[in-house]
Amino acid sequence: MAKNSEDFDLFQKMFVAYQVKFGLTGYKVYLEHGPLEDGDFGAIVINQEDMTATVRLSSNLSKRSKVVKDPARTAKHEAVHLLIGRLVELCKERFVSPSEIHEASEELAIKLEVLIPDMSPEKVGGK
């Protein structure tokens, strides 16, 4: 049981760090540790309208899954889902204006600009 608790502590710490790094502090996030479908390490449910998200780390992995489980990587994966959540929700709408799609894609592009390290022009080949 201690390992599960340690895993969840790491998961929470890393998720919050990615949430801050990705500029997603406007969301109220609820972190949970509980059973998920076998094979799922983590899951996220986003309510874009309320700006809330429930993020879960699985507590019921098979023996094989426990070997490859990485709470830090799972936290990063779920944080990326939160990062793209607004775009995903817009894609589910039947009627979305081009300006809404443009706004959401610009928001994501600006956040990714900050997250992706700059390349040095000296190290880039070509003219």
Image: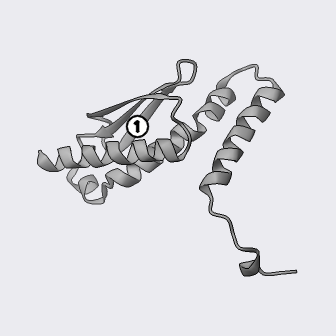
The answer, for residue 39, to whether it is visible in the render is no
Dot 1: element: strand
Q: Where is residue 97 in the image (x, y as percent from the top left)?
A: 80, 23
Q: Is residue 17 above or below residue 88?
A: below
Identify the residue shown where x is 71% and y is 80%: 123
Residue 46 seen anywhere in this rendered image of the structure: yes
Query: What residue do we see at 19% from left, 46% from top?
Result: 4
Find residue 110 and report its horizontal and vertical position in percent: 70, 46
Q: In which quarter of the image is the N terminus?
A: top left
For the residue marked with disc 1, what is the amino acid? Ala
Residue, x 40% and y 44% (percent of image)?
15
> Residue at left 52%, top 37%?
82
Q: What is the tally of numbered marks visible in this picture?
A: 1
Percent position of residue 98, x then y: 83, 28
Residue 28 vs residue 62: left or right?
A: right
Reading the image, the residue beneath label 1 is: 43
Res 88 → quadrant: top right
Nearer-the-camera pick, 25 or 80: 25
Q: Residues within 10 Å of mark 1 (few under 14, many from 20)?
A: some
Give the quadrant of the C terminus: bottom right
Q: Nearer the viewer, residue 122 or 88?
A: 122
Q: In this view, does 5 lie above or below 72?
A: above
Where is residue 85 drawn, in percent x and y?
Answer: 58, 34
Horizontal arrangement in the rendering, residue 113 relative to residue 73 (left or right)? right
In the drawing, does residue 119 fall left or right of residue 4?
right
